[in-house]
Amino acid sequence: MQPSPFTEAISTLASAGEIWIFSHQRPDGDALGSSLGLGLVLRQQGKKVRIFNQDPVPDLYHFLPGQESVEPVPAEAPGRNVLLVALDSSTWERIGPVFHAWKRPPGLNIDHHESNTGYGQVNIIDASEPSTASLVMRLLDDAGWKPAADAAANLFVGLTTDTGSFCYRGTTSRTFQIAARLVELGADPSELARECYQSISPPRFALRRLALQKIQFLAGGKLAILELDPGMFAESGALASDTEGLVEEALTIRGVEISALFEIRAGGALKVSLRSKGKYNVSRLAQEFGGGGHPGAAGINFAADPTPNQQAVLGRLLSLFP
Ligand code: AMP
Ligand code: MN
Ligand code: MN
């Protein structure tokens, strides 16, 4: 019988001399929460662990225990004795160009994106899991490695942010069971909610206000379109990471089925974020343009030609509402 990926992952982690943990660039609550949660537990198990991201930890997540130890990805790959672990990253490229240039596949790839390409040597991919953090928790349970309060708080943040505070589809009784376990282990839901949802910076709010002033409703109010350009970042003083949560804002409106955010970057790249209340699978649509994600939350990156690419995605979105 083939060993399960969980068994293989646990023995890979247990036998590693040193472990380096990575997650997708422009990290969100789940990328950071799963990385720090796993990293802190492994450190407690006596492992030498380093945690990396291509981009700095956004201000909003400076409350996460252990976040000060997150390092930028170095130019050189480490020796072969170091186990590379990728978390919450649907593709190898999403970890960022510095890591990708090492041309060394991660030994372990743990993720909950249905579009994950299985680029690791050992892959734990479960699209039924609402967050990578909860998938990590299952792995820790299997291994018998108990998170301390600091790790539990990180895993809870990954779970609450990726489920939209336990509201999105994919939130099941098991999600609440894992959340309950994390609370028993020391995660404080009200304190973490205050940090995650009631602590946005004034520039982030100013950017949100600029974007919402120009929101467009198409397809009889079923499709909401938001746009961001470099001028709006300059005017608000917001950072690149301050877009998190904006596209979800339009879904709060009755009748809106899909919300799309088109973010034009200074160099002419275009980032598209798509959210659906559930009737439409935006991951499938994103994949038609080389992007991916989950049925309810997906993204696409275009390196250039923002205007025609935006028109193409918009045309496809409108075709969903005949
Ligand atoms: P975002 O809109 O960036 O918050 O992303 C929503 C979801 O789609 C997240 O789960 C991302 O991991 C995923 N995603 C975003 N952009 C891409 C992309 N270019 N390729 C694959 N997955 C993506
Ligand atoms: Mn993520
Ligand atoms: Mn995630």
Image (cartoon, rainbow, N blue to C red):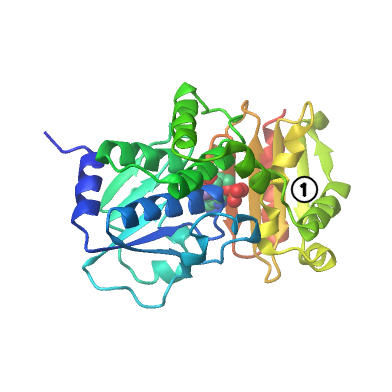
- Considering only vertical position in the picture, is 191 above or below 168? below
Residue 289, visible in the rendered structure: no
Residue for point 67% across, 55% down: 309
Relative to residue 285, is residue 73 drawn left or right? left
Please identify the residue farthest to the left as the structure is shown: 1
The residue type indicated by label 1 comes to Leu
- Considering only vertical position in the picture, is 280 above or below 133? above
Please identify the residue farthest to the right as the structure is shown: 213
Q: Nearer the viewer, residue 73 or 224?
A: 73
Quadrant including the C terminus: top right
The x and y percentages for residue 231 are: 82, 66
The x and y percentages for residue 155 are: 47, 44
Relative to residue 185, is residue 226 drawn left or right? right
The x and y percentages for residue 32 are: 50, 54
Relative to residue 179, is residue 167 drawn left or right? right
Residue for point 78% across, 64% down: 233
- Considering only vertical position in the picture, is 171 above or below 269? above
Residue 215, visible in the rendered structure: yes
> Which class describes the residues within 10 Å of circle 1: few (<14), some (14-19), or many (20+)?
many
Please identify the residue farthest to the bottom as the structure is shown: 75
Quadrant including the N terminus: top left
Label 1: state its secondary structure: strand
In the picture of the structure, the residue carrying the numbered disc 1 is 226
Q: How many marks?
A: 1
* Label 1 CB-ligand 1 distance < 8 A: no
The x and y percentages for residue 294 are: 52, 38
Q: Quadrant of residue 237?
A: bottom right
Q: Nearer the viewer, residue 40 or 110?
A: 40
Relative to residue 223, is residue 138 drawn left or right? left
